[in-house]
Image (tube, rainbow, N blue to C red):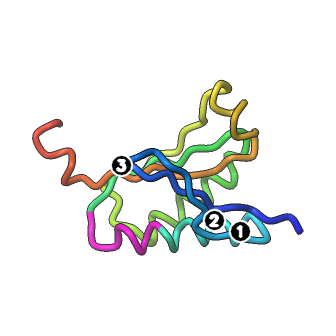
Amino acid sequence: MNLKPIIRVDHDDGKYSTVAKARSIPRALTAIADHLHGLYADSSVWVTVLHGRFAESADALARLLGQRLNAARLEVLRISPVLGVHTGPGIVGAAVLPMQLMTGLV
């Protein structure tokens, strides 16, 4: 079936939950962008797109998020091999921080 799970980690309790499933990488990236747009459409955010070995997919997700979110900062980084052991090399995802949480810290 080649399903790609879209997984969310809750920032309060660290629990994982499946948000959606997609049948291709492009559809999975769109699902991630749609989900994050639903959460942060009205916020200025700092976005970090993370990947294992798929910089091309990470760049595509960064482009989608740049179009859909009000990103004050947008970066693409490769995860460490230590994390990759747990996720596999095909991981592509994003971490989003509302800039209002940075008030007084920067």
Q: Secondary structure at mark 3?
A: loop
Per the image, the residue denoted by label 1 is: 26
- Contact, mark 2 vs mark 1 (Cβ under 8 Å): yes
Give the answer, above or below, for where 31 lies relative to 97: below
Give the answer, above or below, for where 105 lies relative to 73: above
| Magenta stretch holds residue 46 | no
Q: Earlier in the sequence, mark 1 or mark 3?
A: 3
Report, in whole angstroms, how far the alpha carbon at label 2 lies from the one at label 1: 5 Å
Left or right of 4: which side holds 104?
A: left
**Amino acid type at mark 1:** Pro
Image quarter in which the N terminus is found: bottom right
Residue 89 at x, y percent in the picture: 75, 39
Give the answer, above or below, for where 85 lies relative to 71: above
Q: Callout 2: few (<14), some (14-19), or many (20+) C-alpha neighbours within 10 Å?
A: many
Residue 12 at x, y percent in the picture: 36, 49
Left or right of 90: which side holds 19?
A: left
